[in-house]
Image (tube, rainbow, N blue to C red):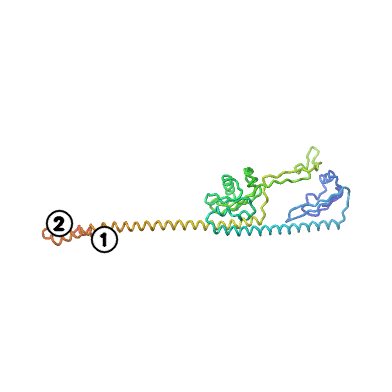
C-alpha cells in the first residue's frame, strides 16, 4: 500500500484490501500521526496476513515504481523465510517428540500398570506438556503438574460428551470450559485424546498458563470514535499495554501428531492389557473348576462305593433266600424277594452309570 499525502495509493497485496481506498478515516489517521506519506509491505504466510512492514515519511514523498516493486519482492522474500524457519523449527520439535514417543512406548510395553506409564520421564516430552492424566476403567492415573482429581474428571465428563471420538486440543481452555480459569496455573491448555469408543477412557496432556504482555501503539479497542458528526479515528497513539491471561503456549502440529500417535499405541496396549486380564481370569476360573471337579469325583467315588456295598448285601441275601429257602416260602414271598433283588440290581446299574 502506497499513499502520498493521503491523496494517491496503490495496493501491493490483496491482504490489505481494507486499506486500498483513500478513505477519510485513513487520511485522518495519517494526519493524526503527523505522517505525510506511507509505504506498507504486507507479509503473507499461508494465505494469511502474518505481519507488516510500515514505512512513514513526515512530508509528501513520491516513491518511484521500481522501488515499490523492489519493496514488494522484499516482502515475498521475507515471507518465504518464514516458511523455512517454521519448517526447521517444526522438524526439530518433531525429532525430539519422536524420541520421547519411542522411549515412552518402550516403557509402556514392559508396564502392567498405568502408574508406571504416567510416571515415565519421557511421557511429558511427547508434546512438551507439564502434566498428563490417563483415565482407564474409571481409575485416574496422573503425572507431572495436573489439576485435582475432581477437576480432571469434570473436564473429561464435559469434553467427552461433545468430543468422545474426535479429540480436542486448545491453548485457551477457559474459552471452552469457563470454570477452567480456576486452575489455569496448571491447565490453561490441553490435548485430549479418547482411548475407547464406548467409555470415557482417555489421555490428556496439560499446559500451564503463560501470562504475556502485549504492547500496542494505542488502544485497539478505541481505534475509531463515533459521535453525532460520524466516525473519527483515535487521536492518541500512546503506548497501551494488554496483559493476556488464562492462555497456554499454543500446540504445534508435530506435538499434536506425536500425542495422537502415542494415544493410538496406548489404545492398543490397553486392549492387550484387557485381553491379558481376561485370560488370567479365565485361567484362575479353570483352575478353580478343576479343583471342584476333583472334589466332586472324590465325593462321587465315595458315595457310589458306600452305596453299592449295602446293595451287594441285599442282592446276596435275596439270592440265598431264593436258592435255599424257596421251597419253604409261599409264591407271594418268592415274588416279593425276586422283585427286591431286581430293584437292587437296577439301582446298582444307576450308580455305576
The kind of secondary structure element at disc 2 is: helix
Question: Could you say where residue 95 lies in the image, as x and y percent from the top left?
Answer: 66, 60
Which numbered circle lies on residue 333?
A: 2
Q: Quadrant of residue 348?
A: bottom left
Classify 10 Å Cα crowding around label 2: few (below 14), some (14-19), many (20 and above). few
Circle 1 Cα neighbour tier, 10 Å, few/some/many (<14 / 14–19 / ≥20):
few
Choose between 347 and 229: the one closer to the eye.
347
- Horizontally, residue 46 falls left or right of residue 346, namely right
**Residue at (77% x, 45% y) in the render:** 216
Q: Are marks 2 and 1 in contact (CB under 8 Å)?
A: no
Question: How many angstroms separate mark 2 from mark 1 (CA)?
Answer: 25 Å
Mark 1 residue element:
helix
| Relative depth, front residue between 40 and 275 | 275
Q: Position of residue 31 (x, y in %)?
A: 85, 44
57 relative position to 108: left or right:
right
Label 2 vs label 1, nearer the camera: 1
Residue at 52% x, 51% y is 137
Position of residue 278 measured from the top left corner of the image (x, y, whole percent): 47, 56
- Disc on res. 265: none
Foreground residue, 298 or 22? Answer: 298
The image shows residue 108 at horizontal and vertical percentages of: 56, 57
Q: Quadrant of residue 103?
A: bottom right
Please tell me which of labels 2 and 1 falls first in the chain: 2
Quadrant location, the C terminus: bottom left
Q: Which residue is mark 1?
A: 349
Q: Is residue 225 left or right of residue 247?
A: right
Amino acid at each position: 500500500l502506497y499513499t502520498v499525502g493521503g491523496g494517491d495509493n496503490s495496493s501491493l497485496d490483496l491482504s490489505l484490501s481494507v486499506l486500498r481506498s483513500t478513505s477519510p478515516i485513513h487520511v485522518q489517521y495519517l494526519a493524526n500521526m503527523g505522517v505525510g506519506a506511507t509505504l506498507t509491505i504486507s507479509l503473507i504466510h499461508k494465505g494469511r496476513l502474518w505481519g507488516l512492514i510500515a514505512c512513514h515519511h513526515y512530508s509528501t514523498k513520491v516513491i518511484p515504481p521500481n522501488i515499490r516493486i523492489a519493496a514488494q519482492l522484499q516482502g515475498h522474500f521475507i515471507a518465504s523465510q518464514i516458511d523455512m524457519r517454521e519448517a526447521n523449527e517444526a522438524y526439530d520439535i518433531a525429532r525430539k517428540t519422536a524420541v520421547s514417543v519411542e522411549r515412552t512406548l518402550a516403557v509402556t510395553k514392559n508396564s502392567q500398570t498405568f502408574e508406571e506409564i504416567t510416571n515415565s520421564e519421557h511421557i511429558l516430552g511427547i508434546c512438551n506438556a507439564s502434566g498428563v492424566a490417563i483415565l482407564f476403567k474409571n481409575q485416574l492415573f496422573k503425572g507431572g503438574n495436573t489439576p485435582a482429581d475432581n477437576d480432571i474428571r469434570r473436564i473429561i465428563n464435559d469434553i467427552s460428551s461433545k468430543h468422545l471420538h474426535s479429540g480436542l486440543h486448545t491453548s485457551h481452555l477457559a474459552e471452552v470450559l469457563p470454570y477452567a480459569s480456576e486452575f489455569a496455573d496448571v491447565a490453561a491448555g490441553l490435548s485430549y485424546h479418547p482411548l475407547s469408543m464406548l467409555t470415557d477412557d482417555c489421555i490428556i496432556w496439560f499446559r500451564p498458563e503463560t501470562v504475556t504482555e502485549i504492547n500496542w501503539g494505542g488502544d485497539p479497542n478505541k481505534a475509531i470514535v463515533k459521535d453525532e458528526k460520524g466516525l473519527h479515528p483515535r487521536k492518541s497513539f500512546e503506548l497501551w499495554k494488554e496483559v493476556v491471561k488464562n492462555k497456554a503456549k499454543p500446540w504445534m502440529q508435530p506435538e499434536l501428531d506425536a500425542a495422537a500417535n502415542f494415544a493410538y499405541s496406548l489404545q492398543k496396549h490397553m486392549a492387550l492389557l484387557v485381553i491379558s486380564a481376561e485370560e488370567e481370569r479365565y485361567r484362575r476360573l479353570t483352575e478353580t473348576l478343576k479343583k471342584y471337579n476333583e472334589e466332586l469325583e472324590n465325593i462321587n467315588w465315595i458315595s457310589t462305593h458306600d452305596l453299592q456295598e449295602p446293595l451287594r448285601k441285599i442282592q446276596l441275601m435275596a439270592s440265598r433266600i431264593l436258592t435255599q429257602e424257596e421251597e419253604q416260602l409261599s409264591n407271594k414271598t418268592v415274588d416279593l424277594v425276586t422283585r427286591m433283588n431286581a430293584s437292587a440290581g437296577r439301582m446298582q446299574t444307576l450308580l455305576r452309570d
